[in-house]
């Protein structure tokens, strides 16, 4: 019987058919759709045709005992008043619902969560009017059984039921109302026939008006004498059940907290472990910081440009500086050449610039041998660092060759000969954007783009107060030469920055970047950024640019000794995505809005999705656990199909828990790196500080939401666990699962201050109806 969803207890005295034909069809359809199990418990008989029509399976009890009727009569008549009160206390813990002689009994504490559409009654914490004292029954020549009041015969039973509005009713008439009995408008014979009840054994019970009055008298006396005892019993039982549910929930939450604490991800320890690995490039950090300082030395408000140029050199990518003349673009190129050593090539391009000026003159000696070759020594093909000013004024005569040098680092020097170019980085400068389609390919070759603006008013005051603005003691000196140590700046001013050599550091970073991976959040960010640029900015980001952007992000992570690309590295995407300088602010804002792991809205998208999945899983769990009466192992008679369904749901909850654990770990790592963002090598301190102030609160809020969802998923998993150490009693398991969390509270959205400050009309346009209601609720709460 443990496998039953609904248990019907009867002594067989039910009409045939037991319910209407329409209700019977509805029952059969529900059984087919949901697999609902309706079992019957037949007391004192071996079979009942009406009960078999209703039930999937019928169980009999005491059917072998022929003297059941006499035993019941004698035992009940001999019960003492004290024994009956104790019996009333037990029976008061149950709520009964009957249809004719058919009754459904469930524990009172659990009835609040059990509903049935097949009973004509509501499950109410009230005592049945069939509960009578022995003395009252003796006076009316009736006696009490566990199944109701028997008058004159055990085979006749009044058809009574309880109605929510009218109280206990008798054959459609109100049994105890202020208006009293209503007289039937039908004839006497019909009235008796209507009030008769036909049982399956052929017995017809006719009840006259006197009997109704007698029953009402019995009801009144019984209610007055036993109402206090019954209510006290129900209250005590409910309190005990609720206490057990609360105790089980408390123990479950304690087990969840302990498990989460034991498996907590320590981001700081993990990052330090990665930095301390043998293959880590964290050991080059001081040299890289010195390189950035060397490039920006003597320049005002050029820290971000200096960082991008050094990063581009390490990643072997080219940098484009857009800005008016006199903003220090060429000085940055010269500083980079001093840093890297080797040949520095610089040219100002015009529409009349010839290939000989860029790639070298033709070799006269080669022409004597009928060979078309150039003398490249001292020109772009042999340079280590190049600065090409007004690069978008290059004409078509040099454009194709320049593209090959920039992209492949190869130079076609006639007769099928391709020379390898040692170029590390080309710094392009321009006062204007390309104005023709043929220059778009050249524009795309510069992965890093930075608009160089004149210094601010505050920066101007600093620059004017400097003794030699824009100059450095190491300017115009060859790095590593002996002359650099004889200058007034001293030996420490111009010493070689890279003690192990720039090539060794570049090779180490390149090798380390191959072991750096991009997780799903970073890849999704690049994908969504391309979609945003295409749909909102009308800018098509090429596949080549995306691949190179991903590699540069890996170089950034490797230079910090990390094994994965973190969201803080993705802040550099704002320098690789825009086409027009004025688009950079919008791109940066989009990146900030989508940078927190878990999607847009500060990571709330992932939290909301997980909450929806978790809520759906809990609803399915509740449905199945209700069918098994709390059993999750099958030891108590639950159907194998239901036990298998619980196992499948438990596996789904475990999978969702692992996803939440991964998200929680990612957010913890993101928070740790945001706290030290001002020490990031390639982010300007002001940019890093602004990002921290904006992103850290979002990350903390998302982490809190993910933590609650993880705890709930863990609790649901343990509630379904078959491990005895974390098991919950079957009779309270369903209530524990139902009280784990409040779905309505978890569906709230954390809006930012900026989102809460927008107008009502703008919010209505921006959000859907449900989100708009939550926005109004959050705004009202914030204004209090």
Image: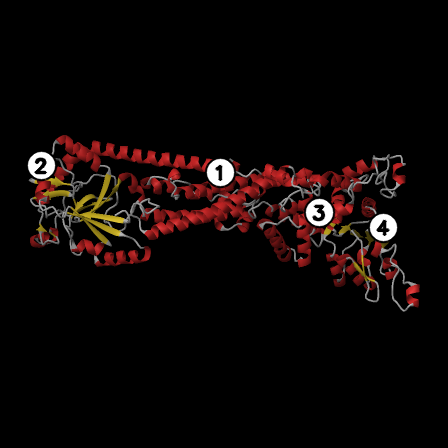
Q: Residues within 10 Å of mark 2 (few under 14, many from 20)?
A: some
Residue placed under numbered mark 4 in the picture? 343
Residue designated by label 1:
260
Is mark 2 in CB contact (under 8 Å) with mark 1?
A: no
Whole-Å distance between the Cαs marked 2 and 4? 117 Å
Q: Is residue 29 above or below residue 134?
A: below
Q: Residue at x 41, y 40 (%)?
A: 740
| Foreground disc of the pair 2, 1 | 1
Of residues 779 and 331, the one nearer the viewer is 331
> Residue 523: where, in percent of width, then height?
60, 52
> What is the distance, in whole Å, between disc 1 and disc 4 at their CAs?
58 Å
Name the residue carrying label 2: 77
Q: Earlier in the sequence, mark 2 or mark 4?
A: 2
Choose top left, top right, bottom left or bottom right for residue 253: top left
Marks 2 and 1 sit apart, C-alpha to C-alpha, by: 61 Å
Alpha carbon distance from label 1 to label 3: 36 Å
Using the image, tell me which numbered label, if any, was put on residue 698.
none
Where disc 2 sits, the SS reads helix
Which-is-in-front pick, marks 3 and 4? 3
Q: Which residue is mark 3?
A: 509
Separation of disc 3 and disc 4 at Cα?
Answer: 23 Å
Colouring mode (rainbow / by chain / secondary structure / one colour): secondary structure
Task: Please determine whether, in this image, residue 368 is positioned above or below residue 560.
Answer: below
Instruction: Point out residue 300 in the picture as x, y percentages from the top left corner.
Output: 79, 40
Q: Residue at x 15, y 50 (%)?
A: 12
Dot 4 falls on a residue whose secondary structure is loop
From the viewer's perspective, tell me whether residue 644 is left or right of residue 578.
left
């Amino acid at each position: 019987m443990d496998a039953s969803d609904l248990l019907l207890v009867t002594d067989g005295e039910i009409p045939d058919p037991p319910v209407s034909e329409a209700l019977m069809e509805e029952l059969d359809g529900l059984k087919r759709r949901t697999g609902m199990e309706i079992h019957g418990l037949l007391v004192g008989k071996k079979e009942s045709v009406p009960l078999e029509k209703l039930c999937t399976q019928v169980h009999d009890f005491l059917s072998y005992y022929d003297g059941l009727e006499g035993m019941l009569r004698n035992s009940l008549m001999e019960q003492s008043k004290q024994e009956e009160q104790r019996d009333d206390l037990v029976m008061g813990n149950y709520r009964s619902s009957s249809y004719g002689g058919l009754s459904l009994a469930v524990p009172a504490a659990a009835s609040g969560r059990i509903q049935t559409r097949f009973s004509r009654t509501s499950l109410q914490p009230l005592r049945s009017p069939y509960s009578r004292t022995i003395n009252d029954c003796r006076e009316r020549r009736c006696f009490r059984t566990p199944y109701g009041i028997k008058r004159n015969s055990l085979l006749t039973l009044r058809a009574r039921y309880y109605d929510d509005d009218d109280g206990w009713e008798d054959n459609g008439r109100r049994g105890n109302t202020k208006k009293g009995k209503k007289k039937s408008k039908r004839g006497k014979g019909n009235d008796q026939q209507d009030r008769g009840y036909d049982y399956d054994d052929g017995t017809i019970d006719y009840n006259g008006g006197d009997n109704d009055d007698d029953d009402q008298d019995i009801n009144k006396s019984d209610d007055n004498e036993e109402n206090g005892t019954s209510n006290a019993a129900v209250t005590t039982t409910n309190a005990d059940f609720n206490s057990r549910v609360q105790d089980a929930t408390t123990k479950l939450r304690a087990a969840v907290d302990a498990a989460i604490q034991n498996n907590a991800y320590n981001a700081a320890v993990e990052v330090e472990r990665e930095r301390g690995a043998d293959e880590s490039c964290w050991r080059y950090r001081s040299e890289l910081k010195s390189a950035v300082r060397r490039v920006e030395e003597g320049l005002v408000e050029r820290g971000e440009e200096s960082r991008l140029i050094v990063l581009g050199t390490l990643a072997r990518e080219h940098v484009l500086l857009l800005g008016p003349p006199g903003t220090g673009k060429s000085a940055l190129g010269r500083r980079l050449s001093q840093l890297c050593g080797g040949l520095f090539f610089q040219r100002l391009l015009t529409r009349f610039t010839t290939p000989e000026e860029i790639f070298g003159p033709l070799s006269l000696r080669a022409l004597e041998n009928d060979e078309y070759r150039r003398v490249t020594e001292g020109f772009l093909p042999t340079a280590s660092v190049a600065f090409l000013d007004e690069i978008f004024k290059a004409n078509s005569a040099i454009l194709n060759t320049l593209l090959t040098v920039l992209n492949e680092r190869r130079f076609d020097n006639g007769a099928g000969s391709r020379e390898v170019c040692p170029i590390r980085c080309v710094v392009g400068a321009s006062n204007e954007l390309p104005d023709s389609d043929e220059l778009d390919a050249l524009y795309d070759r510069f992965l890093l783009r930075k608009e160089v603006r004149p210094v601010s008013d505050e920066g101007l005051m600093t620059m004017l107060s400097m003794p030699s603005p824009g100059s450095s003691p190491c300017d115009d000196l060859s790095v590593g030469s002996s002359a650099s140590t004889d200058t007034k700046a001293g030996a420490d001013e111009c010493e070689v920055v890279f003690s192990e050599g720039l090539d060794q550091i570049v090779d180490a970073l390149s090798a380390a970047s191959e072991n750096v991976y991009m997780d799903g959040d970073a890849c999704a960010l690049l994908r969504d950024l391309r979609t945003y640029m295409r749909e909102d900015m009308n800018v098509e980001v090429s596949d080549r640019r995306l691949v190179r952007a991903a590699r540069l992000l890996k170089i950034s992570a490797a230079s910090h000794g990390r094994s994965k690309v973190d969201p803080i590295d993705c802040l550099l995407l704002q320098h690789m995505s825009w086409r027009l300088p004025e688009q950079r602010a919008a791109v940066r804002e989009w990146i900030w809005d989508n940078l927190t792991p878990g999607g847009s809205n500060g990571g709330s998208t992932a939290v909301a999705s997980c909450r929806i999945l978790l809520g759906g899983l809990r609803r399915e769990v509740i449905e199945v656990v209700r069918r098994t009466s709390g059993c999750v192992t099958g030891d108590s008679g639950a159907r194998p199909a239901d036990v298998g369904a619980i196992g499948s749901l438990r596996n789904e909850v475990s999978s969702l828990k692992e996803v939440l654990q991964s998200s929680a770990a990612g957010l913890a790592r993101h928070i740790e790196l945001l706290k030290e963002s001002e020490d990031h090598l390639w982010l300007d301190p002001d940019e890093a500080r602004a990002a921290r102030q904006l992103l850290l609160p979002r990350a903390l809020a998302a982490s809190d939401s993910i933590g609650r969802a993880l705890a709930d998923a863990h609790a649901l998993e343990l509630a379904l666990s078959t491990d005895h150490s974390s098991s919950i009693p079957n009779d309270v398991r369903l209530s524990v699962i139902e009280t784990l969390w409040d779905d309505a509270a978890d569906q709230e959205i954390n809006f930012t201050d900026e989102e809460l400050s927008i107008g009502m009309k703008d919010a209505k346009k921006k959000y859907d109806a449900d989100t708009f209601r939550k926005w109004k609720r959050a705004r009202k709460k914030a204004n209090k």
